[in-house]
Image: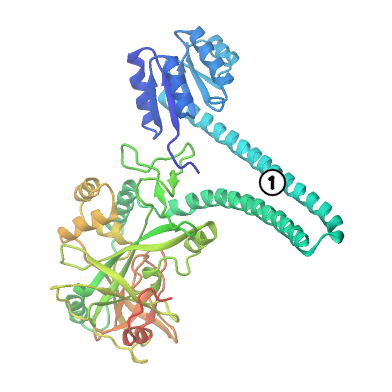
Amino acid sequence: MNTVAEKIVVVQAESSGRGPLVSAVGAAGYEVSVFATSQEALQVIRERGADLLLLDGSATPSGAREVLAAIRGSAATERVRVILLVGPSAEARAAALDLGADDAISEPWAAAELLARVRTQLRARRADQVLIEKAQLAEEGQKIAHTAFDALAVTEKMTQDAVSLNRRLKMGVGGVLSIAVVMAAIYFLFVRKTSKDIQLDAATIARLERGLVRQESLMSQARKLRESQAAAPVLLPTPPRPGASAISIISENAQSVCLLHVSVAFRNIQTGQRLHYAGLNAQGDPLEDSDGNPILTLTGNGPEVKLDVFGSGFFVGQQGRIVTNRHVAEPWWKNQDLGDLAGQGLQAEISSIHAYFPGVPRAFAADIENLSKDADLATMRVELGDLKRPALPLDPSKNASQPGAPVVLMGYATGLAAILARTDEDTAQQIVKQNGGQPSRVLDELARRNLIRPLITQGHIGDVLPDKIVFDAQTTSGGSGGPLFNQEGKVIGVTYAVLEGFGGSNFGIPIRFSEPLLAGPAKTGAN
């Protein structure tokens, strides 16, 4: 994985031709330097290095020949890939390749083709670098092995003479043997560490990209939800009791159901450094390599890589306590994708947790208090200050849930996208664009506009099992941690498993499983 943007040097004598070249290459996220003469470019390449040289050879073929000769003849520049910009004829392209260029493209060129050829040459250069690094590793290992064998040879000679030597000399023999063992161990660890770093690079990109929220994807999700709701509005089942019961439950309790935004960062287990992007392009998106993967680093100054997780929770009083799911409080809990990162040298950790309550124009910082070892439940502490919210009543009795009984479910299914979907297209576009698509800033603006409120669905209990309640009130991801109310307006369960697409049977944990968490002392960060 590259830790910095790849460097491209452009040599273009005509000032009118430099702008289009720099714009085309720079927009792709590369670090671009432009020069009017090849001598200036060569000096910079020798001093600071470069990955690729874009050289205008159409005007001065002899000058291009000199540059290519200097590139190929200098150890400091021999790994630089070269693309020549030549005239429109096939002969010109053939002549460029004969001169030693890695590729040639005719003018006038198209930006898409130019960037495709640039990516191809950079991929080839990275492949060359991998081979060079492997060769260097093998050479280093060979040197260490030779040293170790020399030490063993000396040891063997000393051992043959040890019969006539005193005890002190025999201890010296043991010391040499120890040195040989240590050197062999160093070589083994060196090889193992190099392999592990290569494995970490590939795994990090593959796993993290699936969870990153982009401005375009956020608007796309909101638009799809809005269109699906307009095309096929959801018809909620009507409970057998009068509708005033559900209305009463909603009006009294919805204000105590909060949206939870959990931000997850990634730390290197050995060094303690957090994972960062190498930088951002002009659009504010992470710089990408030629394969389209974000350029990540443990030492750069770019923004931290963070995974945004959305869930639901509800206020139960007791000095600012919130009940939710453990997999919301610790998104890596029983999550294979995030859990496997530990084997790749990274550890997921909480960067921040914020709770958003309906009708409140700001977020509240939250901290994990207790985590259940027996169920997918957790409690958090929130400092609400002067904010007053009713504590939701709980019914932990075993008879609280009955098959066929009506239920009301509240939560923030589909998280941020669903909240945006409930606004009009222009408003959603404005909020997302003004805040750069950053989830925390978008949420703050939605809260300021009083647009955050839970989705509410109704249904019936299908089955009651010792450790779960099966119901058909519709929800989906993001609704996890939401309260499930019975017809008396009391919380009987916590949503913990949902099926995609707002359909089928969903599952809740009986609220009685939260009693040990609420009764016990705070154990922040407990396992």
Q: Position of residue 171 (x, y in %)?
A: 74, 62
Residue 179, visible in the rendered structure: yes
Q: Position of residue 196 (x, y in %)?
A: 58, 52
**Which image quadrant is residue 440 in?**
bottom left
Residue drawn at x 64%, y 53% is 186
Tag 1: Cα neighbours inside 10 Å, few (<14), some, or many (≥20)?
some
Q: Residue furthest left?
A: 386
User: Nearest the camera: 511 or 176?
Assistant: 176
Residue 25, visible in the rendered structure: no
Look at the image and tell me in which quarter the C terminus lies: bottom left
User: Nearest the camera: 77 or 56?
Assistant: 77
SS under mark 1: helix
Q: Is 321 on the left-hand or right-hand side of 34?
A: left
- The colour scheme of the drawn protein is rainbow
User: Nearest the camera: 467 or 161?
Assistant: 161
**Which image quadrant is residue 109 in?**
top left
Disc 1: which residue: 144
Q: Amino acid at mark 1?
A: Ile
Q: Is 161 on the left-hand or right-hand side of 247?
A: right
Q: Is residue 59 above or below residue 19?
A: above
Residue drawn at x 45%, y 87% is 466
State how many labels appear.
Answer: 1
Q: Is 421 on the left-hand or right-hand side of 109?
A: left
Q: Position of residue 345 (x, y in %)?
A: 51, 57
Q: Position of residue 130 (x, y in %)?
A: 59, 39
